[in-house]
Image: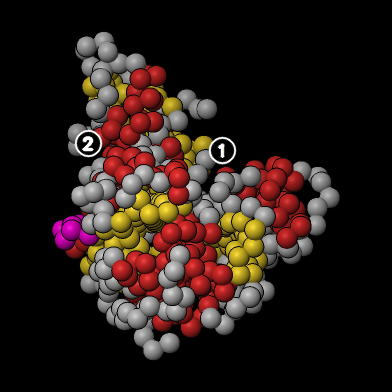
Amino acid sequence: MTDLTLKSLFVDALDRFGSRPAVHYQGQTYSYGDIVTAANQLAHRLRQEGVGPGVSVALMMSNRPEYVVADQAILRCGAVKVALNDMLSASEIDYILRDSDARVAITDAGMLPVALRSAPPLLDLVIAIADPDECPDGVVPWSDALAGQPDTVPSVNPTPADIGLIVYTGGTTGLPKGVTHTQRNLTLNLFSHVMEMGLLDDEVLLLMSPLPHSAGFLLQAGMLKGARHFLETKFDPELVLQRIAADHVTFTFMVPTMIYRVLDRAGGRELDLGSLRTILYGAAPITRERLEQGLKVLGPVFMQLYGQSEAPNFITRLRREDHRLDPDGEHRLASCGQPATMTAVKVVDEDGQELPRGQVGEIAAYTPYTMVGYRGRPEQSAKTLRDGWLHTGDLGCMDADGYVYLLDRKNDMIITGGMNVYSTEVENVAATCPGVGQVAVVGIPHPDWGEAVVAFVVPDDTGAFDEAKLLAHCRTELARYKQPKAVRVVETLPTTVYGKLDKKALRAGWPGW
């Protein structure tokens, strides 16, 4: 590899694996050679449309082999990936396509109608993974996009400073922010993934969560090691157990809610789960009771990560050996671990000054793969990135051994089922529903989801408020995981002595599930 770009990294790496199985999906197996050939063909088609460094390409599809091919094709063009999942609402996708200045969309049949809303004048090309007879005029079927194209690597030379990824995350304004990463950032981030995941040459990964999120980074890391990947479109605890037993899965990624359901499904059954080496999880700590059960059923396989879109996945990690139930180590289960190998972490006050160990402040991280900024938002970028340090918005502390403990979220972000939800985004949508006078959205601890989105509503004096209509309105405007799980009508919203909305009081007053 001559420079730190995704193209130089993956072209050299994947050529080594040839006929080795790369992706298993719905009973079909695709070798590394299959993926490379299709990726090169698609890349040449994209190049014909002028796709190259600086050009944004939207990936709009569920987990499937074509996602892997398209991902590789984009990086072989040196272009900018904008990955969107099918849980987003049409209005969210439309905003992201416009904000990212996407010129091409590669979509499956399910998301094709949403892509067509923006094409033209926004999109120059829409490629659909669909039967040619199902594609409207102007839409290029996947098979046609690849047909007749060379299977060689296209001639284009991205630089380490070129943008390689824009990933969208919620924001305090209610509109998603485009987190931008350079080719250099992404290459170094993948080095970190390979190291921290501890991937071996015989790895078999089971990936069930959306590839546009954390799972996509894990997939890329696995491919660098020549791993096999079982892709699933949804989580099924019985299938997890079957895959581990029958297909000798060694590595999988889940949030604690998913782990709990797998353990419930396993029960007292006799299962051959000996191949499993790692369950990587994030979004929340695992409870002591469930860890005890997990260690008994699955063995010492647990590893926790903490990261953000601004520094993907690995700011800290809680290692397998840290998942201990003995008196000397049990307290660390409440932490998200120590800083990753390529990362420095400190706890700072409001002025950005480092605090002594044990004091509570904002978590700040320094990594070689921190974002370069938020697209088109210089003020927010400057507030988040100060002197090279990423100010995460998470409140916590660090113990004498460097273990980080997250205590609260400065920006009121909710994590439900492993997905990030910003309360202001939900509030802005709910406030447009007839009959809503005031609304506050908080995350309430939930035994399955970690946190559940709950809306507290003060109706206006029109008498038009209707809980069912509010939920229906949110279903139309928000991704499923962002929609409130419950609505509670209140007379007033509590405030602090400073006149600010007191969300802690709302959480404390929740009667329970």
Rendered location of residue 229, percent (x, y): 60, 63
The question of residue 379 being in magenta is answered with yes
In percent of width and height, residue 214 lies at: 47, 58
Residue at the bottom extreme, as displayed? 2
> Which stretch did the figure color magenta?
375-380
Residue nearest the observer in this picture, 390 or 400: 390
In this rendering, would 441 be left or right of 288? left
Report whether residue 367 is seen.
no
Instruction: Point out residue 311 in the picture as x, y percentages from the top left corner.
Output: 37, 65
* Residue at the limit of the structure toward the top, as seen here: 463
Task: Specify the farthest residue to the right.
Answer: 270
| Closer-to-camera residue (344/385) | 385
Residue type at the position of mark 1: Pro
Q: Where does label 2 land, which residue? A: 500
Residue extending furthest left?
379
Query: Residue, x 52% and y 37% (percent of image)?
Result: 446
Return the mark for residue 447. 1
| Picture colour scheme | secondary structure
Q: Quadrant of the N terminus?
A: bottom left
Does 88 sit above or below residue 97? above
Q: Earlier in the sequence, mark 1 or mark 2?
A: 1
Secondary element at tag 1: loop
- Circle 1 packing at 10 Å, graded few (<14), some (14-19), many (20+), is few
Q: Is residue 39 left or right of residue 94?
A: right
Where disc 2 sits, the SS reads: loop
Along the horizontal axis of the image, is 18 left or right of 352?
Answer: right
